[in-house]
Amino acid sequence: MTGFVVRRIGHTLLVLFCVATVSFFIVRLAGDPVQQMLPPEATAEQEATLRASLGFDRPLPEQYVSYMTGLLSLDFGQSVFFHRPAFEVIMERLPLTVDLAVAALAFTLVVSIPAGIVAAVKRGSATDTSVMASVLVGQSTPAFWVGILLILIFAVNLQWLPASGTGSPAHLVLPAVTLGLYSAAMIARLLRSSLIDVLGEDYIRTARAKGLSGFRAVTSHGLRNASLPVVTVVGLEVGSLLGGAILTEQVFSWPGIGRLTVEAITYRDYPLMQATVLFLAAVFVVVNLIVDLSYALLDPRVRLS
Amino acid sequence: MPTAVLRALRRNHAAKVAVGVIVLVVFVGLFAPLISPHDPNLQNLELKLRPPFWMSGSEPGYLLGTDKLGRDVLSRIMYGTRVSLLVGLAATVLSGVVGAVIGVVSGYYRGWREQVFMRLADVQLAFPSILLALAIIAVLGPSLFFMILVLGLTGWVSYARVVRAEVLSLREREFVTAARAIGDTGPQIMVRHLVPNIVAPLATIGTLQVAAMIVAEASLSYLGLGVPPSVPTWGSLLADGQLYLRSAWWIAVFSGAAIMMTTLAINVTGDLLRDVADPKAYTR
């Protein structure tokens, strides 16, 4: 187990290093970013001042080394728009993105688990067909359109829920449903196929033969065995929900990290954009690591492979 | 494979409808200048925010209503089809080619090449799909070319992984050993013997990928980072429509419906192809 953990952590550190490098170079893809960050009427003097304050006047290798060493002490650079360390701005917005991701995950699980079980148990029935059709629609509908439809129905027409902003649990409902819909569809589909595989196993037949009710056989024997791949994907979805909230946050003007990224792009605040991109990717990588390690704890076969 | 696809298609009514929708979308995309009722950029402020034809206050000739500048929503959606299809197909082909090359090389040679490419795939996967494209386009500036390039170059991982797995098993097969025995070089074996055997899985992933690329394009356009604003796209229509949701719901609803219908049709067709390619999955 220790060997597996060490190997997995080493791999994660390598990926994080590459992710940081990619983030560094993205901002410099089009050459000197300072020119793009200033309005066309800016003087050469203003340009030189900004360039010096951001360190863009130094040679590229030197910039890279100071950026990477800064990251070790969580120095993600300075936001030009907010005039504050980018990491500080990100930390301020993080709780809102976490709230949204947790609510979206709750919605995902509440919808997908019963849907997946019912579809698997009643395989081939009308219920199964309608669950699978909903899954396909859920996976094909772009999140931002779902969000706009929900706003139209529940905020504009029925006026039950707020269309945007934060402040109360009611504000969280529409964004959470929007963000969780795709994951719900995916997990329902996965749980269904994984449960169908398990329900065909001999031990389920044995359990039934010994007099266990269909419901008990599914919940205590089937679900437990079918849940391992689902747990993995749910774990990975947490990372996606945290990182993939850009569009949902934009639709609902939800001031989390996704919206901060779009704001950084709008204000041409490239250091902040670089920081949010790196932060979101790093969160995803670290969540992946945690999922892998916990999966190895649950299933010894993973450690050996 | 083509006969198996046709046979499966005959049995599957949903897939028949889906293929019909795809044919319609492609037709609209190709012939938009000939069949669209109006110039998509023609403004007429006297006709602004008119509702669709069945509602009172609608304007004859503007079936799906007009937007804030009096432009015809139907014509803008029809022209938007062109950008969506172009980006969807071009980015898919680009990512398919890149992914297939990386997958074949990794799977055939293994060793350091496989290590490097698969680690690169891990790094690529660390970025939430839209984030990398968003950041790169923000720096390079919005353009159709960059959009295709960025989406194409960031979408290769799923192809590479599947192709690599296929090649890992193919390289042990007798026909590859025989080719090696008669003196074929690595590149010859890859091009003549391995590539023809990975076309089916590539086509399946590619179909599903077109839908993902169309959504990615719409997402970037929605965020204002798509093609320049003068070109109507489904995503930018949706963004405009959201601003007028209270007074003119039809702009956002119809443009979003166009995206959903297209991606749903492509996904249903992609599922059919996958079922044909993998009959075991068909029974699930």
Image (cartoon, helix red, strand yellow):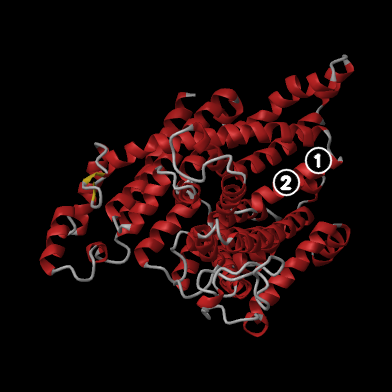
Tell me where residue B72 sits by quadrant: bottom right
Which numbered disc covers residue A128?
Answer: 1
Tell me where residue B206 sits by quadrant: bottom right
> Which amino acid does the dot numbered 1 rest on?
Asp
In this view, A298 is above or below B51: above
> Which amino acid does the dot numbered 2 rest on?
Ser
Is residue B174 visible in the rendered image? The answer is yes
To which chain does the residue with label 2 belong? Answer: A
Number of numbered discs on residues: 2
Q: Is residue B35 left or right of residue A82?
A: right
Q: Earlier in the sequence, mark 1 or mark 2?
A: 1
Kindly state the secondary structure of the residue where label 1 is placed: helix
Q: Residue furthest bottom?
A: B34
Q: Cβ–Cβ below 8 Å for labels 1 and 2?
A: no
Q: Is residue B236 left or right of residue A79?
A: right
To which chain does the residue with label 1 belong? Answer: A
Q: x, y (%) of residue A62?
A: 18, 53
In this view, B179 is above or below A296: below
Which residue is pictured at 66% across the width and 65% down the height? B193
Could you tell me which quadrant the C terminus of chain B lies in? top right
Work out whether residue B212 or residue B62 is closer to the camera in this orientation and state it. Answer: B62
Mark 2 lies on residue? A134
Q: x, y (%) of residue A128?
A: 81, 40
Q: Residue furthest left?
A: A45
Kindly state the secondary structure of the residue where label 2 is placed: helix
Assess disc 1: are there few (<14), some (14-19) or many (≥20) residues with their C-alpha within 10 Å of its C-alpha: many
Q: x, y (%) of residue A161?
A: 55, 40
Which residue is pictured at 49% across the width and 39% down the height? A239
